[in-house]
Image (cartoon, rainbow, N blue to C red):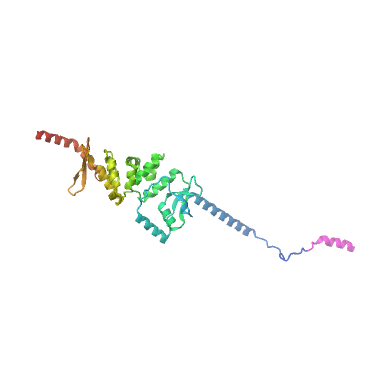
């Protein structure tokens, strides 16, 4: 074999070794298929966790921090503005010392980007705004019906709304176009109770309700008594005059109610004067009922909250009482 032939064979028998750069003097090590699979699983797990977090945020099950200045109240308020200042200060002190323990519930504002509307938690928003801290909130997709039901159920569960607040809230919902079923769901009540609340809410003039306030200790019976008395001629004007007095302005809400009821209960005399009601009391001094007179009517009123069953007893016995009265009249003649 000639030298020329050997040289040609040696050229094709083995490739010359490639020079490596100073940064790559050793060829990269092979990555095992197990390591690649493990890395892929890690990325899949992160992606799954991220998706779950997104779903939780969208569903309102994870609280986030937002600026309380961006939170507006519900368009249908269920509370009056004259809340107890002492209670508010206690809440403020608690949050200042221990932080916000219970998140509020909000939805994105339907017409103002970057803002929210609260379903509940307005006092916590106010506290955190004053403290200059962010508010923890569940941000949830809520329809108008979802919003009012959520706020009603939360406050009803805490038994935090007074009777008149519930009545006005029920009235506002109905006037806002919500069906009676929504009113019932929002306040966790049956249809009959919803009707009574709406009736009272509509029957007391708004300015009188506002002047009285929450009246937390006044139940349905006494509010119904006020409604009945306000039907008398001049009763609403007398109630307004009493509530606008300096005496009333210095009183608490429950006491303002008592002043309004007392003023409305005074009956007009036939000569245009105003007379005090005649009150019947039990042996213990509790009021059983009262008699009021106008130019055309005599009216006996019995507090339903305390004596609802007694009122039915009286109406059943009324024919016997009238017969006894008639007999007595004949005897006197």
The verdict on residue 14 being magenta is yes
Q: Quadrant of residue 300?
A: top left
Please provide the residue range marked out in magenta: 1-16
Does the rendering let one see residue 95? yes
Residue 271 screen position, x and y as percent: 20, 37
Q: Residue furthest right?
A: 2
Q: Quadrant of the C terminus?
A: top left
Between 62 and 257, the one nearer to me in the picture: 257
Side of 273 relative to 68 (left or right)? left
Side of 93 relative to 315 (left or right)? right
Going 9% across and 35% down the picture, which residue do you hit?
332
- Up-down: is 19 above or below 250? below
Q: Quadrant of residue 41?
A: bottom right
Between 191 and 89, the one nearer to me in the picture: 89
Going 39% across and 58% down the picture, which residue do you hit?
92
Residue 240 screen position, x and y as percent: 30, 44
The secondary structure that dominates the magenta segment is helix
Side of 172 relative to 111 (left or right)? left
The verdict on residue 199 being magenta is no
Between 304 and 292, the one nearer to me in the picture: 292
Residue 50 screen position, x and y as percent: 54, 54
Residue 301 screen position, x and y as percent: 23, 41
Between 102 and 79, the one nearer to me in the picture: 79
Side of 3 relative to 297 (left or right)? right
- Up-down: is 247 above or below 11? above
Q: Quadrant of the N terminus?
A: bottom right
Does the rendering let one see residue 121? no
């Amino acid at each position: 074999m000639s030298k020329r032939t050997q040289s040609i064979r040696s050229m094709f028998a083995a490739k010359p070794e490639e020079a490596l750069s100073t940064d790559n003097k050793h060829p990269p090590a092979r990555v095992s298929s197990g390591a690649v699979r493990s890395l892929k699983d890690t990325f899949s797990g992160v992606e799954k966790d991220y998706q779950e977090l997104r779903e939780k945020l969208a569903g309102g099950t994870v609280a986030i921090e937002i600026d309380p200045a961006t939170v507006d109240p519900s368009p249908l308020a269920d509370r009056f503005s004259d809340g107890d200042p002492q209670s508010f200060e206690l809440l403020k002190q608690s949050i200042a010392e221990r932080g916000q323990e219970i998140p509020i519930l909000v939805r994105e504002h339907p017409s103002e980007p970057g803002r929210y509307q609260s379903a509940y938690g307005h006092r916590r928003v106010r506290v955190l705004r004053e403290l200059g801290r962010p508010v923890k909130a569940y941000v949830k997709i809520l329809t108008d019906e979802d919003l009012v039901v959520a706020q009603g159920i939360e406050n009803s569960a805490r038994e935090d709304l007074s009777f008149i607040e519930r009545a006005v809230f029920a009235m506002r919902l109905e006037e806002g176009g919500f069906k009676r079923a929504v009113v019932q769901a929002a306040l966790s009540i049956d249809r009959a109770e919803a009707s009574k609340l709406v009736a009272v809410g509509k029957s007391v003039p708004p300015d009188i309700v506002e002047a009285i306030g929450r009246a937390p200790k006044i139940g349905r019976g006494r509010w119904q008594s006020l409604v009945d008395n306000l039907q008398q001629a001049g009763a609403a004007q007398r109630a307004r005059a009493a509530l606008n007095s300096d005496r009333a302005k210095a009183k608490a809400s429950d006491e303002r109610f008592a002043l309004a009821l007392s003023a409305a209960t005074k009956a007009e005399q036939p000569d245009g004067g105003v007379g005090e009601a005649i009150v019947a009391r039990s042996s213990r001094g509790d009021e059983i009922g009262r008699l009021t007179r106008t130019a055309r009517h005599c009216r006996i009123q019995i507090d339903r909250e305390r004596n609802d069953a007694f009122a039915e007893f009286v109406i059943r016995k009324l024919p016997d009482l009238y017969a006894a009265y008639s007999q007595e009249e004949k005897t006197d003649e």
